[in-house]
Image (cartoon, rainbow, N blue to C red):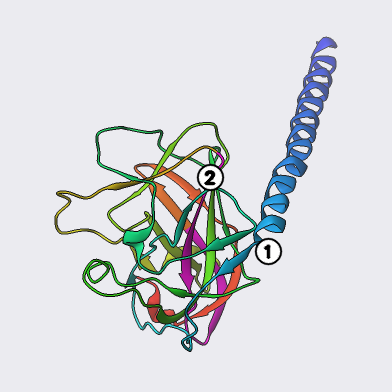
């Protein structure tokens, strides 16, 4: 019977030690993740986006859940200066569904909202092919998607990247304020791909509203999800579904 308290003490010691080791391992891994994000942010904040349009921009308005449209304004290699286009049909890195590339996840890609600069918004999906290029007057932050892997990734189809915006409600719970864009017919649509170490740029509209909250983007292909960094913003409470 005297051995029982000793056994309990030993068990408690090993469990505590294991927990401390696990905690230490997690803490050791955090700086590497933070360094990765920090390096990406530093690059994007210094990157110059060349925009040939200068029409006046304003925030978007919404009273209910809206349909997301995250169209790329650039896909390609990293450069110090990048010319963006608001006509998505001009963006390269397209193919028909003959070759299947890797499905992206949070380990192979990173999504960063750059709040240091603003851009306009792309043309509408259904007018992109039949109108001259113009910049929609809705102000937006550029969003950078970076392929961190050595694989080529599938990142979208038609003129759309599979992204929606989420916001925290009054209880601090993340909820969607947008629903995915869906084509009525997928026949003839091409797909976007992102080569190793390449980047894609899309836009995140800024909304008018009185409810100050936290915002993030969610990229989801099938069941795999990748989340962006979190930023401050305003919305209307009615935008929650």
- Camera-nearest residue between 234 and 60: 60
Residue 59 against residue 41 in the figure, above or below: below
Point out which mark residue 45 bears: 1
State the quadrant of the N terminus.
top right
Picture quadrant of residue 117: bottom right
Residue at 29 percent of width and 62 percent of height: 181
In the picture of the structure, the residue carrying the numbered disc 2 is 198
Instruction: Tell me: residue 203, above or below residue 16.
Output: below
Residue at 48% in and 65% down: 84
Question: Mark 1: few, some, or many residues within 10 Å (few <14, many ≥20)?
Answer: few
Q: Which residues are magenta?
A: 197-217
Residue 200: say if magenta.
yes
As helix, strand or loop, the secondary structure at mark 1 comes to: helix
Query: Residue 188's spot in the image, x, y percent?
Result: 17, 49
Q: Secondary structure at mark 2?
A: loop
Q: Main secondary structure of the magenta part?
A: strand
Residue 61 lies, in percent from the top left, at 40, 85
């Amino acid at each position: 019977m005297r051995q029982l308290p000793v056994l309990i003490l030993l068990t408690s010691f090993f469990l505590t030690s294991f927990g401390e080791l696990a905690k230490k391992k997690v803490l050791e891994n955090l700086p590497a993740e933070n360094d990765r994000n920090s390096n990406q942010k530093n690059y994007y904040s210094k990157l110059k986006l060349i925009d040939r349009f200068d029409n006046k921009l304003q925030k978007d308005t919404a009273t209910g859940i809206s349909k997301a449209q995250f169209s790329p304004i650039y896909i390609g290699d990293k450069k110090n200066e990048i010319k963006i286009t608001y006509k998505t049909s001009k963006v390269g890195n397209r193919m028909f569904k003959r070759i299947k590339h890797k499905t992206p996840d949070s380990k192979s890609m990173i999504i960063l909202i750059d709040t240091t600069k603003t851009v306009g918004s792309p043309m509408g999906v259904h007018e992109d092919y039949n109108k001259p290029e113009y910049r929609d007057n809705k102000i937006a932050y550029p969003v950078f998607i970076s392929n961190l892997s050595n694989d080529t990734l599938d990142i979208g189809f038609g003129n759309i990247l599979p992204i929606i915006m989420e916001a925290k409600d009054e209880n601090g719970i993340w909820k969607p304020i947008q629903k995915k864009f869906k084509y009525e017919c997928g026949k003839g649509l091409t797909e976007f791909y992102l080569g190793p170490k390449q980047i894609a740029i899309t836009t995140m509209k800024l909304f008018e509203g009185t409810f100050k909250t936290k915002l993030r983007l969610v990229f989801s292909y099938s069941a795999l999800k990748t989340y962006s960094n979190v930023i401050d913003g305003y919305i209307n409470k009615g935008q929650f579904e």
